[in-house]
């Protein structure tokens, strides 16, 4: 009970008190339609849909802000948000690094549609409706939660794009920082890790405990210094020395 109360109160760290009650209703799956929330870190409000996991995703993104890099980025940095959901982390990147170029990928069409609206006010953000993969093509996915689709299962399909294609099409040599939360597709990428040569730092959420050690070992073999995030058991941060 005390922990639940602490979590409820902690929302006031990023949601104004006037919007707290509505946010909590959305988080519990109550309410109807959509609502705009003015998050304290952002220059523009973001939209959440009632009856979805949007408010839970907002709590995760803005409550911990664990998606942010651990070290300063160069001026004009290229940031890739792989697994952008409805755009909350990408909006935070746009505000935290206003001179950066942010490219956000989201494979689900409904999530991408809302992300496009949430990011419309930020000229330094590009939304790409696709899933990152080891090669260009198409993938299947499914699941009941919009913040946790299962890759390779279900009846939905989405375009896939490799990191090399994503960067080459935009004339980018390398990404300065990559945030990766791609619901299990990370294993496919780490099985074919040549793309890491074009990344300077990244954080990756690993969706299977058995993958943690192999992913970290691959990163180290490719020249990264790694650490595991204390506030998230499945997240690995990696940067070049």
Image (cartoon, rainbow, N blue to C red):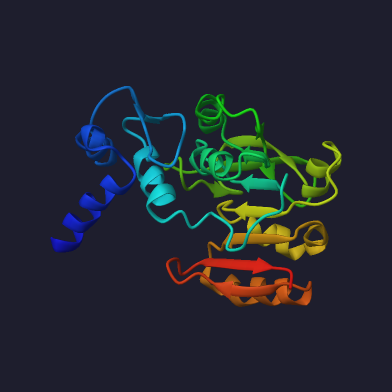
Left or right for 172, reference 9: right
Above or below 38: residue 168: below
In the rendered image, residue 116, in percent from the top left (x then y), is placed at 56, 27
* Residue at 42% across, 43% down: 145
Residue lying at the far left in this picture: please name it: 1
Instruction: Name the image quarter holding residue 32.
Output: top left
Decide if residue 126 is in sight here. Answer: no
What residue is at 63 percent from the left and 35 percent from the top?
157
Looking at the picture, how far across and down is residue 147, in whole percent?
Answer: 46, 44
**Residue situated furthest top in the rendering:** 33
The quadrant of the picture occupied by the N terminus is: bottom left
Q: Nearer the viewer, residue 95 or 63?
A: 95
Please state the horizontal and vertical placement of residue 44, each as a whole percent of the image: 46, 29
In the foreground, 236 or 91: 91
Instruction: Residue 95: name its quadrant.
Output: top right
Seen in the picture, residue 52 relative to 198 is either above or below; the reply is: above
Q: Is residue 28 visible?
A: yes
The picture places residue 212, in percent across and down from the top left corner, at 58, 73
- Viewer-closest of 205 and 202: 202
Question: Could you tell me which quadrant the C terminus lies in?
Answer: bottom right
**x 63%, y 42%: residue:** 140
Decide if residue 217 is on the left or right side of residue 143.
Answer: right
Count of numbered badges drawn on the protein: 0
């Amino acid at each position: 009970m005390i922990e639940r109360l602490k979590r409820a109160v902690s929302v006031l760290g990023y949601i104004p008190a006037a919007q707290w009650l509505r946010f909590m209703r959305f988080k519990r799956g109550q309410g109807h339609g959509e609502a705009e929330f003015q998050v304290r870190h952002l220059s523009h409000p973001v939209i959440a849909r009632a009856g979805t996991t949007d408010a839970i995703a907002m709590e995760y993104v803005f409550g911990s802000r664990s998606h942010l890099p651990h070290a300063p980025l160069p001026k004009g940095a290229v940031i890739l948000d792989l697994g952008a959901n409805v755009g909350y982390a990408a909006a935070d990147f746009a505000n935290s690094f206003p001179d950066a170029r942010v490219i956000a990928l989201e494979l689900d069409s409904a999530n991408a549609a809302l992300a496009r609206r949430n990011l419309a006010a930020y000229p330094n953000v590009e939304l790409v409706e696709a899933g990152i993969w080891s090669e260009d093509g198409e993938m299947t996915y499914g699941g009941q939660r919009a913040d946790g689709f299962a890759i390779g299962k279900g009846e939905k399909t989405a375009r896939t794009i490799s990191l090399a294609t994503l960067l080459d099409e935009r004339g980018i040599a390398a990404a300065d920082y990559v945030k990766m939360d791609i619901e299990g597709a990370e294993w496919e990428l780490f099985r074919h890790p040549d793309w890491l040569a074009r990344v300077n730092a990244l954080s990756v959420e690993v969706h299977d405990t058995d993958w943690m050690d192999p992913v970290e070992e691959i990163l180290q073999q490719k020249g990264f210094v790694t650490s595991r995030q204390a506030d998230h058991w499945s997240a690995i941060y990696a940067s070049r020395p």
